[in-house]
Image (tube, rainbow, N blue to C red):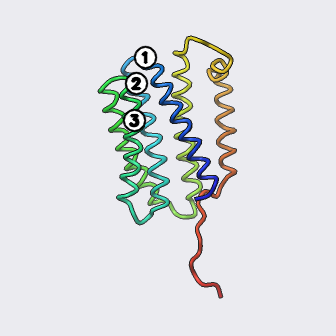
Amino acid sequence: MTTGLIILIAFLLTCSVGVINFSFYTRRKVTTMHGMIFSMSMAMGVGLFTGTIIGLLYRDELLLATVIGMATGVLVGGVIGSFYSLLAMMEGILSGVMAGMMGAMLGVMIKISDWDKGIMVMFTIALAICCLNIYEMLSYVHHRNFIVRIFRNPLFIGIGFVLVCLLFYTQSPFIVIKNSGFHH
C-alpha cells in the first residue's frame, strides 16, 4: 500500500462518517423509503470499494476478501438503516453482503496492470454515492448557513467531485508490486 491509497481510504472513510452523521440528523425528517435508499446505497458503495481493495491486496484469499468486504458493507448499511427502521436496516445489511461479495470477486479478477484503474473506478463510484446522499440529506437541514448553501449548489458539488477525483488519481500508483526475482 502506498500513501495515496491510505489517503484515498481515509477520505472515503471521512465521507462515510459524514453520511452516517447526516443520517442520524435526518432520521425523523425523511420517510422509511428514503432511509432504505440511503442505507442501501452507502452499503453498496462501501462494500464494493472495500471488497475490491482487499481482493487486490490478498489475491489468493478470496474468502478473507469476501468476509471483510461483506462486514464493512453490513456495518455501514446496518448502522445507517438502524436510524430509520428495521426494514431499512435489513435492506442495508443485505445490500452490504451482496456488494462485499461482488467487490471481492472483482478485486481478485482484475489484472495487475489494471489495479490503479480498478481502485479509481470503485473510489469514484463510492464517492459519488456519498456526495449524492449528502446532497439529498442537506435538503432537510432547516438552518441554511453559508456552508449548507454551497453544498446544495449542484455546480459546486459537480466541480468539487471532479477535482477531488482528479487530485486522488494523481496519487497513483496505489499499490506497488515488489519484484522478488533475481536480476542478472
Q: Which residue is mark 1?
A: 30
x%, y% of residue 117? 58, 54
For marks 2 and 1, the one nearer the N-term is 1
**Dot 3: what SS?**
helix
x%, y% of residue 60? 41, 66
Q: In the picture, which quadrant includes the N terminus?
A: bottom right
CA neighbours of label 2 inside 10 A, class few (<14), some (14 to 19), many (20+): many
**Dot 2: what SS?**
helix
Q: CA distance from mark 3 to mark 1?
A: 17 Å
Q: CA distance from mark 2 to mark 1?
A: 7 Å
For marks 2 and 3, the one nearer the N-term is 2
Tell me which residue sits at (35%, 44%) in the image: 98
Left or right of 13 in this view: 168: right
As rendered, which of 173 and 25 lies closer to the eye? 25
Q: CA distance from mark 2 to mark 3?
A: 10 Å
**Amino acid type indicated by mark 3:** Gly
- Quadrant of the image occupied by residue 162: top right
From the viewer's perspective, is residue 20 above or below residue 57?
Answer: above
**Amino acid type indicated by mark 1:** Val
**Amino acid type indicated by mark 2:** Gly
Q: In the picture, which quadrant includes the C terminus?
A: bottom right
**Dot 1: what SS?**
loop
Q: Which residue is mark 2?
A: 35
Q: Which residue is mark 3?
A: 77
From the viewer's perspective, is residue 145 above or below residue 173?
Answer: above
**Whether label 2 touches label 1, CB < 8 Å:** yes
For marks 3 and 1, the one nearer the N-term is 1
